[in-house]
């Protein structure tokens, strides 16, 4: 991964790296963080139907209660690991809201066992935060291979970077970076038997 000075993609082990997304030449900031304590084994042991799944728009302060409601809907019982998951997502929503300046955040957490957004694409948003709590993470080709990946789609056999599990990727979308935004895709899952737990946070300036 290209993470040098002046790079389009920057990576570090501290959350402060996400603030670099406001730099003019940065289009993806990656916080390479370890798994929150005890969360990986707990999530891996859950049957797919117990994973929270849903979408809502809220202020960052409202995120814990809204996510708790999704956990309740999935009959995911209260425990320290569930509280850790909620706190972690809420912390990312707060950080995203501060960086983006959006008063509300659009939070989507999905349990995915299909190919989802398997096509290489650019996001038509301002900023988007991605993190994968279970299963493989978001993938992107080297920047110089982006056009080839867009043309080839499933036929693309070139190199790919992948956001590690629990790492946080903050993407600058087309609204802010135009054609410089990073081409990426969700990892193909069909037939693998794997269920991802994927978090996506967007800017939400209204309830529309």
Image (cartoon, rainbow, N blue to C red):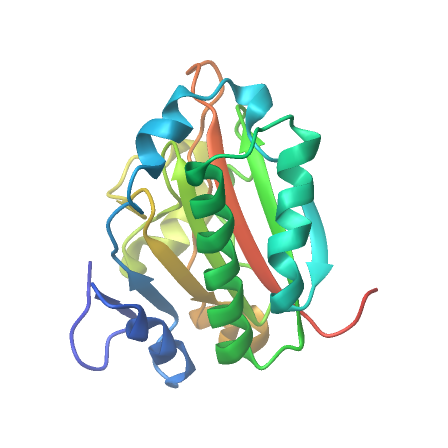
Identify the residue at the far front of this view.
Answer: 79
Q: Nearer the viewer, residue 25 or 71?
A: 71
The part of the image, by quadrant, that contains residue 124 is bottom right
- Of residues 13 and 137, the one nearer the viewer is 13
Q: Position of residue 30 (x, y in %)?
A: 31, 62
Say whether residue 146 is left or right of residue 68.
Answer: left
**On screen, residue 11 above or below 161:** below
Q: Position of residue 149 (x, y in %)?
A: 39, 46
State the image quarter where residue 145 is shown. Answer: bottom left
Image point (53%, 23%), residue name? 113
Q: Is residue 5 above or below residue 52?
A: below
Q: Quadrant of the N terminus?
A: bottom left
Q: Residue at x 37, y 85 (%)?
A: 23
Q: Which residue is nearer to you in this view: 66 or 120?
A: 66
Q: Residue furthest bottom?
A: 24
Taking the image as drawn, is residue 20 in sight? yes
Instruction: State the count of labels.
Output: 0
For the C terminus, the image quarter is: bottom right
Q: Name, please, the residue furthest toward the left.
A: 4
> Taking the image as drawn, is residue 116 in sight?
no
Left or right, 205 with respect to 102, comes to right
Q: In x, y percent, where is residue 75?
A: 64, 26
- Name the residue rendered at 19%, 68% in the picture: 3
Position of residue 134 in the picture relative to residue 32 (left or right): right
């Amino acid at each position: 991964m290209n993470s040098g000075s002046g790079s389009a993609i920057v990576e570090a082990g501290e959350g402060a790296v996400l603030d670099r997304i406001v730099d003019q030449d940065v289009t993806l900031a990656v916080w390479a963080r370890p798994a929150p304590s005890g969360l990986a084994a707990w999530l891996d042991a859950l049957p797919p139907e117990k994973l929270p799944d849903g979408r809502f728009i809220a202020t960052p302060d409202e995120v814990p209660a809204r996510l708790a409601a999704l956990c309740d809907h999935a009959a995911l019982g209260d425990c320290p690991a569930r509280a850790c998951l909620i706190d972690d997502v809420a912390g990312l929503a707060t950080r995203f809201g501060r960086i983006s300046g959006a008063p509300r955040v659009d939070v989507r957490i999905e349990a995915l066992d299909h190919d989802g957004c398997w096509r290489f694409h650019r996001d038509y948003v301002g900023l988007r935060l991605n993190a994968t709590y279970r299963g493989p993470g978001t993938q992107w080709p080297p920047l110089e291979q982006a056009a080839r990946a867009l043309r080839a789609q499933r036929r693309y056999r070139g190199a790919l970077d992948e956001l590690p599990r629990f790492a946080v990727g903050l993407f600058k979308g087309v609204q802010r970076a135009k054609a410089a935004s990073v081409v990426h895709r969700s990892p193909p899952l069909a037939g693998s038997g794997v269920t991802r737990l994927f978090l996506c946070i967007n800017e939400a300036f209204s309830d529309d």
